[in-house]
Image (tube, helix red, strand yellow):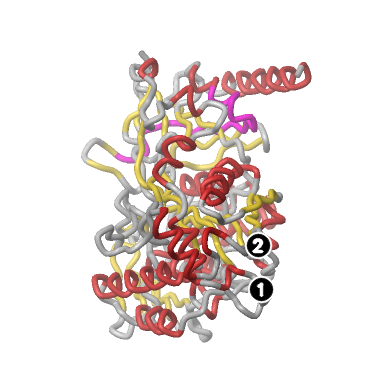
Amino acid sequence: MKYSIYLIFIALFLFSCTHRNVDSGKSIFRYNESAGIISLDPAFARDQAGIWACNQIFNGLVQLDDTLAIQPCIARSWEISNDGKIYIFHLRNDIQFHKNKCFKNNIRKVTAHDFVYSFSRIIDPEISSPGAWVFNEIDSVEPFKALNDTTLEVKLKRSFPPFLGLLTMQYCSVIPHEALDLYKDNFRRNPVGTGPFYFKYWKEGVKLVLLRNPYYFEGDKTGRYPFLDVVSVTFLSDKQTAFLEFVKGNLDFISGLDASYKDELLTRDGKLQSKYESEINLITQPYLNTEYLGFMVDTVKLKSGNPLRLQKLRQAINYGFDRVKMMRYLRNNIGTPGIFGMIPMGLPGFDSTKMKGYFYDIQKAQKLLAEAGFPNGKGLPEITLSTTSSYLDLCKYIQQQLIEIGIPIKVDVAPPGSLREMMAQCKIPFFRGSWIADYPDAENYLSLFYSKNHSPEGPNYTHFTSPEFDRLYEKSMTETVDSLRFKMYQQMDNLIMEQAPVVVLYYDQILRFTQKNIQGLGSNPMNLLVLKKVKKGKQN
């Protein structure tokens, strides 16, 4: 205990020291990143910490607004060929890279050639970017071509309607070749982009400082973005310590909810505790994250006597526990009970009136259990559910309710890395999983059930196979009319629910807490941090 207190004291000392190093006369937005940042190179922006930082430094062709609609960014407009294979982007001619010594302390305009360079770098095997999959559908012959300085052509090998949404990812940011020529492998800590803030200082594990880009090209009727002078990021690993700094006013923003302060901030119904109402703003909305339990349904991989081969048993498990009560008592109603399908709330195409999921119904569960050959659970062997410690409380709750109707469940806890490896290698028949959207299209979720995406190469960890699902999936990829494609998505989602290769637990929810003097932060279902519109007033 004394050792832990000593570590917290040291962390707070470093935290306060790093804050004193920033000019107090500036408009400074402060947040903490407990997970740390590995790289500021957008080619490696694979986790939330890196994505948030890169989103302040870089831009791409297109961007998402808070409703997940795709908007122009560096590309002012674009056209897509009738067959969906050729994209022509028309670039703005007034966008500058950050002033940097790679340009001899000057600036340079962005051209289409920079996008050819940036995209080609992502798919270069020597770079080993985790974002290379974004361009899986590109043509094998000259997929990226600068027709002139302001016109870019991208060619696909076949139609793929979600492609434009993929280009909003930070992997697809534009970077100058001069910066890579100068910094080489050290570009990760010397980023040069076009974003609203430019890189100033980074002491890994201690502090990151970004400064206002005076040449930034976006704005609104109140002025040119960004309105902040400085973004200051600290790296306190202890979330409770970061929360205490937020309460003291030393941080402007915290995201999410940790168990250490969950009940301190929120009521059982997910509302802000009354004592904080005058000091803190709560911003909340649906998050494109579906939490679920997955069954291995591949009869070749499963042992012949494994009862999870039986569809009716999987359906009985789906009906056998109360998701509404689970959310209220274990998550303070943060999130929505998973009674629809895999496609989460907040995603274009979601329609609760057409999604057929599962709800709590003991009678149906018992009837299905009997039809599966196990009346009241008689003869049913123990089923092991594999999870991580973070979700042990949810799994214990489900275990208790299923045991009450005759379904014996054993909960096995594994480290996150080990669990993911076992899922990929088909070594566990029943597991907890989650899927956070990479891009704003339901195809991202439905791809988890496409037979050609079986793990370990793809994300189909359940090894679900359905010729009808595959037919609909492939047909939807040729449909360019959103409303018609969404109908196919709903058909696929309902087919998944009928076959029950998963148990949808809940659809997550974004929680953002800010000081009262922060305006314009907003939120979006991708949980992307956008600071270019933020204004900071005087603290009360």
Sequence-wise, the earlier of marks 2 and 1 is 1
Q: Nearer the viewer, residue 526 or 295?
A: 295
Which image quarter: residue 495? bottom left
| Element carrying mark 2 | loop
Q: Residues within 10 Å of mark 2 (few under 14, many from 20)?
A: some
Residue 520 showing in the rendered view: yes
Compared with 148, 539 (above or below) is above
Label 2 to label 1: alpha-carbon separation: 9 Å
Percent from the top left, x then y, of residue 481?
25, 75
218 sits left or right of 456 in the view: left
The span shown in magenta is: 224-243
Type of residue at label 2? Pro
- Residue receiving disc 2: 381
- Report the residue at 56% width, 59% height from top: 377
- Residue receiving disc 1: 305
- Report the residue at 57% width, 22% height from top: 19
Percent from the top left, x then y, of residue 114?
49, 65
Type of residue at label 1? Gly
Furthest residue in direction right, as rendered = 3
Q: Nearer the viewer, residue 113 or 3?
A: 3
- Report the residue at 60% width, 19% height from top: 16
Compared with 269, 70 (above or below) is below
426 sits left or right of 279 in the view: right
- Report the residue at 68% width, 74% height from top: 303
